[in-house]
Image (spheres, rainbow, N blue to C red):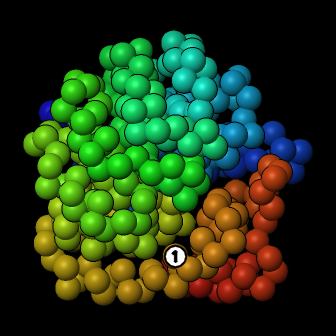
């Protein structure tokens, strides 16, 4: 089974719940994992940027990976996020982190450094050469400061055997369509924009790695499944109901919105590590009112 079959549908980029003393709340994380799996998500991602990974120590990251494997207990696939703007450090993480049970590695583009397209190619080629696991590129230029051009994505897909997919969050529909037109048959392409997932699936994407599905996994993952079956009329009806939720979740910062939502659902404490802070009172009130209907 290739990655396009294994990771077709909705993947959830898990939050990292914290206790009031800012330690990781593993009990709460277990509740979130159970919530999204029972809600129909096809796989989960640990150490995604939604998990506030820049604030985690290496020891905490390893503990999160191991806990996620154990708690998921093979119910769904687990993807592990490993990225950064120091290629050598990323290679060290690939060597030191427990990855035997990972289905794939998700690696965000190098942030701040703004490498050239050749630099991006060589960065990802080095990562792929350091692991036997399939590597999924993560293109999110609004956060990294550099877009992975469609030509670079396709070059990596064709020239590096275990570059197996991309999470595309550029918001550029034309770029997305170029990738979908030119990709190798087995190359996974998923949306990284909850708000654009429906039209991007209509263009040929294989699903979405979602933040919003932490909060309403049943409705979101069903919308994605309907879209993948080309039932766009019913999928649009569900997506229309979710659109206000997208606005509330992402208006200030991620994952402040989704943590407020999960707190309203009774799953986690509404705690973030600096520099992130909880939602403003006005937005928090609107989001909680919206979430209470689910």
Q: Is residue 44 left or right of residue 7?
A: right
- Quadrant housing the N terminus: top left
Residue 200, can we see it?
yes
Which residue: 28% across, 60% down?
176
Of residue 216 and residue 138, the one placed in the foreground of this image is 138
Instruction: Tell me if mark 1 has few (under 14), some (14-19) or many (20+) residues whose alpha carbon lies within 10 angstroms of its own.
Output: some
Of residue 257 and residue 31, the one placed in the foreground of this image is 257
Q: Position of residue 90 (x, y in %)?
A: 55, 23
In the displayed structure, would residue 36 be above or below residue 97?
below
Which residue: 89% across, 45% down?
21
In the displayed structure, would residue 147 be above or below residue 159?
below
Q: Secondary structure at mark 1?
A: helix
Q: Residue furthest left?
A: 185
Which residue: 70% across, 23% down?
59
Q: Residue furthest right?
A: 21
Q: Where is mark 1, residue-wise?
A: 246
Q: Position of residue 179 (x, y in %)?
A: 23, 52
Q: Position of residue 31 (x, y in %)?
A: 59, 51
The answer to which image quadrant residue 60 occupies is top right
Residue 261, can we see it?
no
In the displayed structure, would residue 191 be above or below residue 196?
above
In the displayed structure, would residue 195 be above or below residue 121?
below
Of residue 271 and residue 197, the one placed in the foreground of this image is 197
Which residue: 80% across, 76% down?
280
Of residue 176 and residue 78, the one placed in the foreground of this image is 176
Q: Is residue 260 left or right of residue 238?
A: right
The answer to which image quadrant residue 260 occupies is bottom right
């Amino acid at each position: 089974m290739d990655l396009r079959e294994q990771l077709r549908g909705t993947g959830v980029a898990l939050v990292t719940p914290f206790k009031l003393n800012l330690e990781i709340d593993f009990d709460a994380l277990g509740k979130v994992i159970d919530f999204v799996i029972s809600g129909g998500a096809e796989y989960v991602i640990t150490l995604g940027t939604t998990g506030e990974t820049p604030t985690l120590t290496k020891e905490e990251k390893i503990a999160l990976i191991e806990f996620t494997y154990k708690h998921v207990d093979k119910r769904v696939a687990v993807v592990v996020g490993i990225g950064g703007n120091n290629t050598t450090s990323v290679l060290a993480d690939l060597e030191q982190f427990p990855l035997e049970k990972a289905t794939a590695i998700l690696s965000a583009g190098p942030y701040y450094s703004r490498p050239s397209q050749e630099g991006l190619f060589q960065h990802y080629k080095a990562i792929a050469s350091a692991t036997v696991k399939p590597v999924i590129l993560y293109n999110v230029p609004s956060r990294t400061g550099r877009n992975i051009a469609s030509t670079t994505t396709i070059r990596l897909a064709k020239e590096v055997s275990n570059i197996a997919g991309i999470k595309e969050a550029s918001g550029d529909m034309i770029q997305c369509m170029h990738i979908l037109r030119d990709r190798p048959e087995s190359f996974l392409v998923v949306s990284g924009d909850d708000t654009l997932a429906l039209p991007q699936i209509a263009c040929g994407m294989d699903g979405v790695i979602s933040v919003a599905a932490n909060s309403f996994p049943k409705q979101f993952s069903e919308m994605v499944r309907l879209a993948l079956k080309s039932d766009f009329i019913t999928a649009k009806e569900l997506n229309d109901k979710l659109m206000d939720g997208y606005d509330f979740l992402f208006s200030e910062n991620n994952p402040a919105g989704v943590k407020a939502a999960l707190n309203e659902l009774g799953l986690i404490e509404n705690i973030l590590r600096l520099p992130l802070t909880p939602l403003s009172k006005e937005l928090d009130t609107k989001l909680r009112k919206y979430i209470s209907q689910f």
